[in-house]
Image (tube, grey):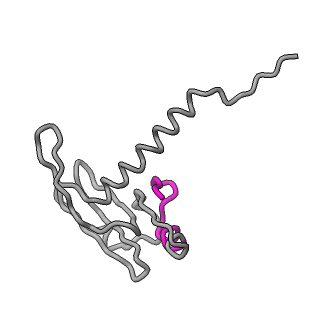
Amino acid sequence: MVVDNWYTSIELAEILGQHNTYLIGTLRANRKSNPKEIIKKKLKKGESYSLRSNTNVMIMKWRDKRELLMCSTKTTNTMIDIEKRRKVKTKPITVLEYNQGKSSIDLSDQKASYSNSILMIQY
């Protein structure tokens, strides 16, 4: 399950994990249950830092143009080299899987927006 930061929390990840459902999502920095160690960690561009709980929830912080918090019960903190515009860039696999999962949701939303959801009734 791919979710955005409105829904993502450590508690949700743990509940879904108990039901054998993976979660990957962006995480808001101000959630109460976030580990303070990861929130306060200062990173340079391209660096990442992660913690994994005994319930298999990984919280990862990665800095590209800005800091990004991710929550995952599916992926690890593995970094992968990708080529973009003839440059090689290193990104966490968690970010790549999130982007891939989110793109299909965005496409579905786009297609749904084309159909008229209001039923017109003629008298």
Compared across the picture, whether 21 is left or right of 97 comes to: right
Residue 112: x %, y % from top left: 57, 34
- Rendering quarter of residue 71: bottom left
- Rendering quarter of residue 63: bottom left
Question: Split into 4 quadrants, where in the image is the C terminus?
Answer: top right
Compared across the picture, whether 69 is left or right of 108 comes to: left
**Residue 12 counted in the magenta span:** yes
Q: Residue furthest top?
A: 123
Q: Residue at x 44, y 44 (%)?
A: 104
The residue closer to the viewer here, 10 or 117, is 117
**Residue 54 counted in the magenta span:** no
Q: Residue at x 38, y 73 (%)?
A: 35
Compared across the picture, whether 63 is left or right of 13 comes to: left
Residue 109: x %, y % from top left: 52, 38
The residue closer to the viewer here, 40 or 22, is 22
Q: Residue at x 25, y 59 (%)?
A: 92
Compared across the picture, whether 64 is left or right of 120 comes to: left
Residue range in magenta is 1-15
Q: Residue furthest bottom?
A: 54
Q: Residue at x 65, y 26 (%)?
A: 116
The residue closer to the viewer here, 33 or 25, is 25
Residue 81: x %, y % from top left: 16, 54
The residue closer to the viewer here, 41 or 78, is 78
Residue 33: x %, y % from top left: 46, 72
